[in-house]
Image (spheres, rainbow, N blue to C red):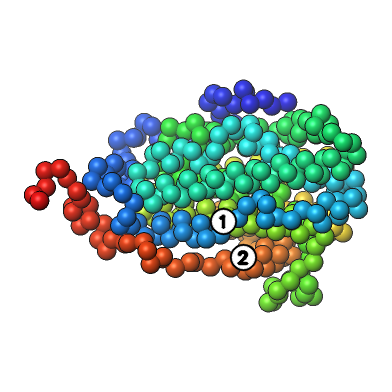
């Protein structure tokens, strides 16, 4: 069993996963404007980094809370699931809550203090708040489903036993180790850590999220060709809606990381990105194998059999998407599409229903036409008044 104390120090994964430390070549890095203190900039406005600010405003416009997710129908529908389906949902939310609990701090925390751009700090601060909403919802689902599954008034003790079983998954310990090695406890250059953040947010738990969307079906006979559709059917509207929202926000974070990466002077190599993505993909695949093993290697969700090869290909497809958004080549060039068409269709419908499109710059936000000239015009005490 894993305890949070086991992850208080520096963790390494496996020797063949370690990358050469860049600390020996710190002097080779050029100065990063995003990391340089600007004593002449005392306030947020005028905006200097428009793309970063727009990413923050887009995220802010999509704000939602746990109270908006109606769970009454999910609670009722849970009773009609098979034992394996119930166990899958409890295990999934146990994994999600265990990751947050054992890490002990937000994955975004190191970045808000290192980056010196206030526009970016707004985004990181907002995402830390949104992350708390995700945690609240995960724990709420876990509590409700555990109580119904165990058929007792107070499921706290039994729920702990379920969580302990999940904590013994080797993939969970590898995920925690990866996060600490490449982000939370890393002393590598900012450019490497920010890319690792995008990979972590977008790829970790993508398999679990995909399988949760098995509990919905699009109302269209030609899902394979992804022709236009507008509706899906589900007996778990809260589960499906919240899962799609969180998936959307993880993609939003990936796009934000891509914006930051494009503004950096020092950019990680294709080799680095390929290696860390492959690590995460292997951990995700291992998670799926472990969950299927606990289900006796046969698991049907909402009438659809979970096929390991399909999930594995979906993870690789998502990995390619991750690399492409960050501006890199495919990590798995032989995987051109996902076999989980229904999952992507449900996600697309929810994203469109949420109005997932860029918002306009608010008229009340002054913008700087020239970042450099604005910096030169900064307020100083020795200015000639």
**Callout 1–callout 2 Cβ contact below 8 Å:** no
Q: Position of residue 48 (x, y in %)?
A: 31, 56
Please state if 332 lies on the left or on the right of 37 as rendered: right
Residue 110's mark? none
Asked whether 3 or 74 is in front, the reply is 74
Asked whether 365 or 96 is in front, the reply is 365
Q: Position of residue 73 (x, y in %)?
A: 82, 57
Q: How crowded is mark 2: few (under 14 residues within 10 Å), some or many (20 or more)?
A: some
Q: Which residue is drawn at 54% across and 23% down?
A: 9
Q: Is residue 52 above or below residue 162?
A: below
Q: Is residue 133 visible?
A: yes
Name which quarter of the figure residue 93 lies in. top right
Q: Which residue is drawn at 81% across and 44% down?
A: 145
Q: Position of residue 322 (x, y in %)?
A: 55, 55
Please state if 93 lies on the left or on the right of 27 as rendered: right
Q: In this view, does 58 lie above or below 190?
A: below
Q: Where is residue 297 in the image (x, y as percent from the top left)?
A: 85, 45
Residue labelled with disc 1? 63
Residue labelled with disc 2? 354
Asked whether 100 or 74 is in front, the reply is 74
Q: Which residue is drawn at 54% across and 38% down?
A: 106
Q: Residue at x 54, y 45 (%)?
A: 129
Name which quarter of the figure residue 88 lies in. top right
Query: Which type of secondary structure does the marked residue at label 2 adopt?
Result: loop
Please state if 279 lies on the left or on the right of 144 as rendered: left
Q: How crowded is mark 1: few (under 14 residues within 10 Å), some or many (20 or more)?
A: few
- Quadrant in the picture for the N terminus: top right
**Real-space CA distance between mark 1 and mark 2, rounded to the nearest whole angstrom:** 10 Å
Name which quarter of the figure residue 279 lies in. top right
């Amino acid at each position: 069993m894993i305890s949070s104390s086991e992850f208080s120090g520096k963790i390494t994964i496996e020797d063949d996963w370690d990358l050469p430390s860049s600390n020996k070549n710190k002097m080779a890095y050029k100065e990063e404007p995003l990391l340089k203190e600007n004593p002449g900039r005392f306030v947020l406005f005028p905006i200097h980094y428009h793309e970063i600010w727009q990413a923050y405003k887009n995220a802010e416009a999509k704000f939602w809370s746990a109270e908006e997710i109606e769970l009454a129908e999910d609670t009722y529908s849970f009773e009609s699931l098979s034992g394996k389906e119930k166990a899958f949902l409890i295990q999934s939310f146990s994994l999600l809550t265990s990751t947050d609990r054992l890490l002990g701090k937000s994955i975004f925390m190191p970045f808000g203090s290192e980056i010196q751009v206030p526009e970016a700090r707004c985004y990181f601060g907002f995402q830390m708040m949104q992350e708390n909403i995700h945690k609240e919802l995960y724990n709420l689902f876990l509590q409700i489903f555990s109580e119904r599954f165990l058929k007792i008034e107070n499921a706290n003790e039994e729920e702990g036993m379920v969580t302990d079983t999940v904590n013994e998954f080797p993939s969970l310990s590898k995920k925690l180790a990866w996060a600490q090695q490449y982000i939370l406890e890393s002393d590598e250059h900012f450019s490497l850590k920010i890319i690792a953040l995008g990979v972590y947010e977008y790829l970790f738990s993508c398999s679990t999220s995909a399988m949760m969307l098995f509990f919905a079906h699009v109302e269209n006979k030609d899902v394979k060709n992804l022709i236009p559709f507008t509706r899906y059917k589900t007996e778990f509207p809260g589960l499906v809606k919240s899962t799609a929202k969180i998936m959307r926000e993880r993609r939003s974070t990936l796009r934000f990381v891509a914006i930051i990466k494009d503004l950096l002077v020092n950019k990680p190599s294709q080799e680095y990105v390929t290696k860390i993505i492959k690590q995460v993909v292997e951990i995700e695949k291992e998670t799926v194998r472990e969950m299927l093993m606990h289900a006796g290697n046969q698991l049907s969700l909402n009438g659809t059999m979970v096929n390991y090869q399909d999930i594995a290909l979906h993870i690789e497809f998502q990995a390619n998407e991750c690399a492409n958004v960050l501006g890199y080549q495919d990590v798995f060039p032989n995987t051109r599409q996902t076999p989980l068409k229904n999952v992507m269709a449900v996600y697309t419908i929810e994203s469109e229903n949420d109005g997932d499109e860029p918002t306009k710059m608010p008229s009340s936000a002054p913008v700087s036409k020239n970042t450099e000239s604005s910096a030169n015009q900064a307020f100083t005490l020795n200015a000639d008044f």
